[in-house]
Image: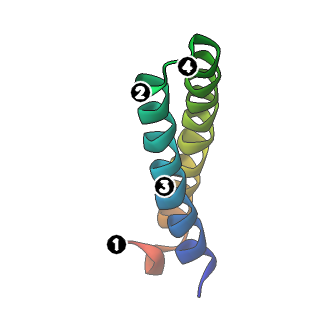
Amino acid sequence: MTIASNVKQCLATIKGIEAQLSSLAVNSLDEEAQTLFHETSLQIGDIKKDLQYRVLELERNEPQYKG
């Protein structure tokens, strides 16, 4: 598996984690847990943006990784 494939797979996983944390924040009955899930989701969102940028960089610098 290429580095680009690994980064894209990681990005897909992070997107799933972000969605799950958002769901937990909405569905949790405990306010403290809601806050924790929401804050963690925001942190994961920042990581997701970094990975998306990295994918763009890989695709721009290495045309064989586009797609």
Disc 4 packing (10 Å; few <14; some 14–19; many ≥20): some
Q: Which residue is mark 3?
A: 56
Amino acid, disc 3:
Leu
For the view shown, which residue lies furthest in the top direction?
A: 31
The secondary element bearing badge 4 is classed as helix
Disc 2 from disc 1: Cα separation: 35 Å
Disc 3 from disc 2: Cα separation: 34 Å
Disc 3 packing (10 Å; few <14; some 14–19; many ≥20): some
In primary-sequence order, the first of circles 3 and 2 is 2
Q: Which residue is mark 2?
A: 27
Please identify, in this view, whether the residue under mark 3 or under mark 2 is nearer the observer.
2
The answer to whether marks 3 and 2 mark residues whose Cβ atoms lie closer than 8 Å is no
Disc 2 packing (10 Å; few <14; some 14–19; many ≥20): few
Disc 1 packing (10 Å; few <14; some 14–19; many ≥20): few
Image mark for residue 67? 1
User: Percent position (x, y) of residue 63?
Assistant: 45, 74
Residue that appears at 46% across and 52% down: 16
Please identify, in this view, whether the residue under mark 4 or under mark 3 is nearer the observer.
4
